[in-house]
Amino acid sequence: MASFRVVVVEDHEQFRRFIYSTLEKAPELQVVDIVSDGLAAVQKAEELQPDLILLDIGLPKLNGIEVARRIRRLSPETKILFVSQESSADVVREALGTGASGYVVKSDAGSELLEAVSAVLRGEQFVGKRFSGHDFVPGSDAVASQEFRTESAVAPLQRGREIARNHEVVFYSDDAGLLDDLTRFVGAALKVGNAAIVVATESHRDSLLLRLQAHGLDTDAAIEEGRYIALDAADALPTFMLRGMPDSVLFLKLLGDLIGTAAKAGQGEQARVAIFGEMCHLLWAQGNAEAAIQVEKLGNQLVKTYDVDILCGYSLSSVQGGMDSHIFQRICAEHSAVYSR
């Protein structure tokens, strides 16, 4: 019986035990090592040249997407099967884009892991049943790197004349479109050594971080350096809202301090700061459109004062009835460019 040498990369002890006990059921599989961080995974792949690596994404020291890229270079014959708790189709697409052969969500591993291992070792691609209907076309690092371009990803609908430049807004109907634009916007800044501030919902912050990591950006280093600052939009609002309206002094101090910190951490004497914000969307969604518009006006003051580029996001599908046309026009009027997704 053929024997296949397997390395398991997983940082949670309980799940490591589960994987090991599951693989034991297949006598042709030989677990030659189990490691718990990304750097160790790369080292073991180069040293052992295993037939298969079971790889988590959320790992200490080096995320699984970057681990896969390095393994593909150092051990090109090794097949990679991702086993991760991430269930976003976008994350699956990025993972397979590294050249990996399969993807299983951890909650489905009990029923799918051995099937996935067998398929991958046969030279087939395996994606969990929950993703049926998705077309995961393998990508490439070259294509991914091209996505970090500084020009906008979508065609402008209008261009303001007397509004401060570099204060743009995107109206979107689904999260995937917004995250595509946001990944390019923030990724382009970080890639050239600039800084980024993201004031967004938890789900958007988490998804953006995974996408940036999937494109090879060392977000851990950017966070440690202070070049990447992420805040919760709902938590930020009370820090400058008084009696239902933004206090300009509090707002400008909050954002000014953040911009100063981020810019100082950027590379170069004139590092710019990319800012993405959803606070205005939250105000509008709460029925306080006037406050949202006043915050947009304060955003224009930031652009005139600092070397920043601002992108605002509004989800038109998240609020029943959508946005009133008059409010829509007033919000558009406060931006240098308007995009629709």
Image (tube, rainbow, N blue to C red):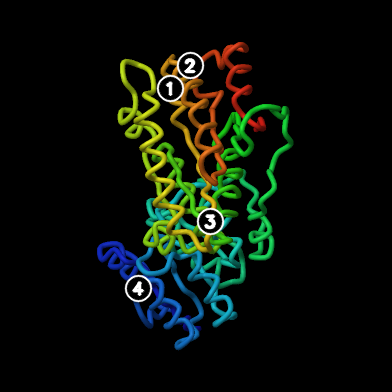
Counting residues from the start of the chain, the first of labels 3 and 2 encountered is 3
Quadrant occupied by the C terminus: top right
The tag on residue 24 is: 4
Residue 298 in sight: yes
Quarter of image, res 329: top right
The tag on residue 271 is: 3
Point 37% across, 64% down: residue? 59
**Amino acid type of the residue that numbered disc 2 sits on in the rendered structure:** Ala
Q: Dot 3: within a 10 Å radius of its alpha carbon, few (fewer than 14), some, or many (20 or more) residues?
A: many
Residue 212 lies left or right of residue 62; in this view the side is right
From the image, tell me which residue sits under label 1.
283
Counting residues from the start of the chain, the first of labels 3 and 1 encountered is 3
**3D distance between C-alphas at marks 3 and 2:** 33 Å
Residue 235 lies left or right of residue 41; in this view the side is left
Residue 14 lies left or right of residue 180; in this view the side is left
**3D distance between C-alphas at marks 2 and 4:** 59 Å
Instruction: Mark 2 and mark 1 in contact? Answer it, CB < 8 Å.
Output: yes
From the image, tell me which residue sits under label 2.
289
